[in-house]
Amino acid sequence: MYLSKVHISPGKSCNAYELHRALWQLFPGRPDDSRSFLFRVESHSRHSGAQILLQSEYEPSTGARDARCLASKPVDYRFSAGQQLRFRLRCNPVKAVKDERRGMVTRNGTEYVRSLRVPLIHDEQQQQWLEKKLQQAGAQLLVADVVQEAPLYFRKSSEKRSGKIQPVLFEGALQVTEPEPFYRAIIDGIGPAKSFGMGLLSLASV
């Protein structure tokens, strides 16, 4: 895996969908690949663009038209049971609510009412969501600060589609309980909306 600092040009940094497309420029020659990177916007200015922390399976190229890799280093994640780590995570805490207006869907021969994702807006709900996600990932939440952030809007011009994501920033400490699932969670990310900069779990020693 690689951790990189990336700059996105002002013209592509104001729309989350276009920013994601710009990051793909750092991995030329892989048009058929599924996304193999996670990222987080660390700072943003309409005039100077966005500074990105990028975690990727492949080493990014040094630069492209709309994205420029400022620095990159290989990382070798190794965890042990009981290890305590500080973390930072921007994510999109949501819950699924059944919505009969959206009709039915069939899975494995059984019909279900389609569900709709709705954001969790209260600190307590958000922290419970994080505790559950980390538990599923092989870690125990020790402490976390919850920082509410401004909504993230995106638009996809080719499909005339737009939407909104409600990001939350968590900073705190965790303890690894199951190293292998935790490693997999680091690679895969936490929660939905990864294409819009959610889910990258950054770690540091306590």
Image (spheres, rainbow, N blue to C red):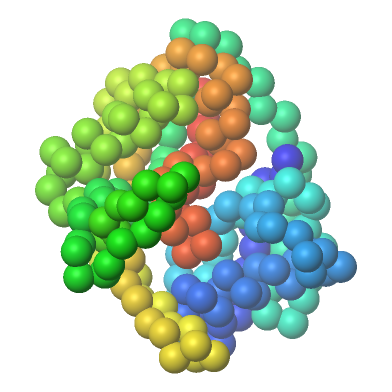
Q: Is residue 48 above or below residue 109?
A: below
Q: Residue at x 51, y 15 (%)?
A: 178
Looking at the picture, how far across and down is residue 167, in whole percent?
A: 32, 58
Q: Is residue 72 left or right of residue 132?
A: right
The quarter in which the N terminus is drawn is top right
User: Residue drawn at (32%, 72%), measured in percent from left and top?
Assistant: 164
Report which quarter residue 9 is drawn in: bottom right
Give the percent coordinates (x, y) of residue 79: 60, 18
* Residue 147 in view of the camera: no
Relative height, residue 55 to residue 9 (above, below): above
Q: Residue furthest top?
A: 82
- Seen from this angle, which residue lies furthest front? 109
**Tag count in the figure?**
0
Q: Residue at x 79, y 69 (%)?
A: 31
- The x, y position of residue 118, in whole percent, is 23, 58
Q: Is residue 60 visible?
A: yes
- Residue 104 in which image quadrant: bottom left
| Quarter of the image where the C terminus is located | top left
8 or 199: nearer the viewer? 199
Horizontally, residue 81 falls left or right of residue 126, namely: right
- Which of the 4 image quadrants contains residue 136? top left
Residue in front for this viewpoint, 78 or 139: 139
Q: Position of residue 111 (x, y in %)?
A: 33, 52
- Residue at point 37%, 59% (across, down): 105
Front residue of 168/47: it is: 168
Q: Nearer the viewer, residue 90 or 145?
A: 90
